[in-house]
Image (cartoon, rainbow, N blue to C red):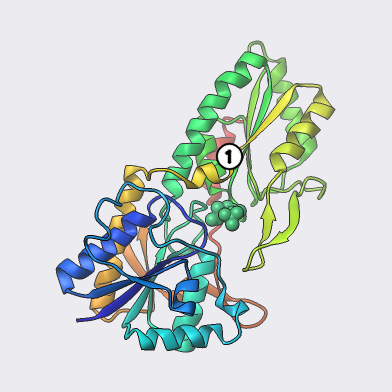
Amino acid sequence: MKNIGVLTGGGDCPGLNAAIRAVVRHAIDAYSFNVIGFKRGWAGPLEGLIEPLTKYAVSGILPKGGTILGTSRTNPDKVEDGYLMIKENVKKFGLDAIIAIGGNDTLGVAGNLQLKYDVPCVCIPKTIDNDVACTDYTIGFDTAVSIATSAIDNLHSTAESHDRVMVVEVMGRHAGWIAAFSGLAGGADLILVPEKPFNIDEICEVLKKRHKRRGKSFSIIVAAEGATSDDGRLNVTTDKTDAFGHVILGGLGVALSSEVERRLGFEARYAILGHIQRGGTPTPSDRILATRLGVKAVDLVARGETGKMVGISGGSVVSVPVMDIVETDKRGHYVGKTKTLDMEFYETAKVFFG
Ligand code: F6P
């Protein structure tokens, strides 16, 4: 019999509860493990915030958005002896492993715990941004794409009725996965991603040509929040950063729509989807992904195969060493490696630009 602690860290996303349910149900039914939940991301193991996770506790949570455990962007590196405090608590609770469900920041912490502090971890990748290395998809991405696509569909009809340019700003700090997928699915006339700095003159040229064509006096631009212009003028950031040092973004849609209006005289509006993309009920694909990854994570713990991340590759559930999903920063700390957009998707979407 083993003891497992499970946590969700970083930004919430639909499918986290499905993953927690899978971990708890499989751990209890197949192996009679004891499972505790850590509250509020890495704050849980740091401060010893726990709750027992029984089958009863996870009953009915499969279709629910958010996370019953709560989450936070707590970074143990920002707390004196933070990592040692976690190690101590893992010992105190008699845990054989932590199952960390998170994106690059959360999994980077798991990497440090596993590789530097010898705390056994198994990682499950989640983030609407889909930017975790060594997995084709992360939990939450499919739901975010579906929300963004339906927003683009709605904005299409109003843009068309008013002859407007509509800029739809989606999340995607370092990677343009949501922008490319929702733009492809929603028939965007232009897509801007962080991987490819955009040129405002070129954008205006495309829009001008498109609006000259009969019956095409409206346009939809899907822009990832982290996209930047090649002249550095439309790189929209705030002066605030989170606990992992990421600048809080937001506002590209505002800047871009007013620039387009100023240059071309076309009426332009923006819609910033923001956290709407992270909420609500998970799609069937996200529930299935979360369930498959949760079950596999428990199987790894049972086999003593900690120090790994579960993921999806070519449709199959796989596991990879934690070492493969991290890299070191300037201080020699492990941080999650960013998986940027596979530009094949962008090139396909580009066929339909203009
Ligand atoms: O989870 C990643 C992400 O969705 C980014 O795309 C976005 O910049 C960030 O979260 C926003 O996070 P917060 O909820 O802390 O504002």
Q: Is residue 337 above or below residue 218?
A: below
**Which residue shows up at 30% across the image and 76% down it?**
4
Q: Tell me the kind of residue under disc 1.
A: Leu
Say which of 23 and 315 sits in front: 23
Q: Is residue 75 visible?
A: yes
Taking the image in four quarters, ligand 1 sits in the one at: bottom right
SS under mark 1? loop
The residue at the point 53 percent across, 51 percent down is 342
Which quadrant of the view contains residue 318? bottom left
Q: Residue at x 81, y 50 (%)?
A: 232
Coordinates of residue 70 in the picture (x, y in percent): 44, 61
Reply above or below: 258 against 130.
above
Question: Is 44 positioned to the left or the right of 335 in the image?
Answer: left
Q: Position of residue 309 (x, y in %)?
A: 39, 70
Q: Residue 141 at x, y = what percent?
A: 45, 49
| Residue placed furthest toward the top | 214
Looking at the rendering, which quadrant does residue 188 occupy? top right
- Residue carrying label 1: 273
Q: Residues within 10 Å of mark 1 (few under 14, many from 20)?
A: some
Quadrant location of residue 35? Answer: bottom left
Which of these two is toward me, 224 or 249? 249
State the image coordinates of residue 264 (x, y, percent, origin top left).
Answer: 81, 24
Quadrant location of the N terminus in the rendered image: bottom left
Instruction: Report the quarter where the C terminus lies.
Output: top right
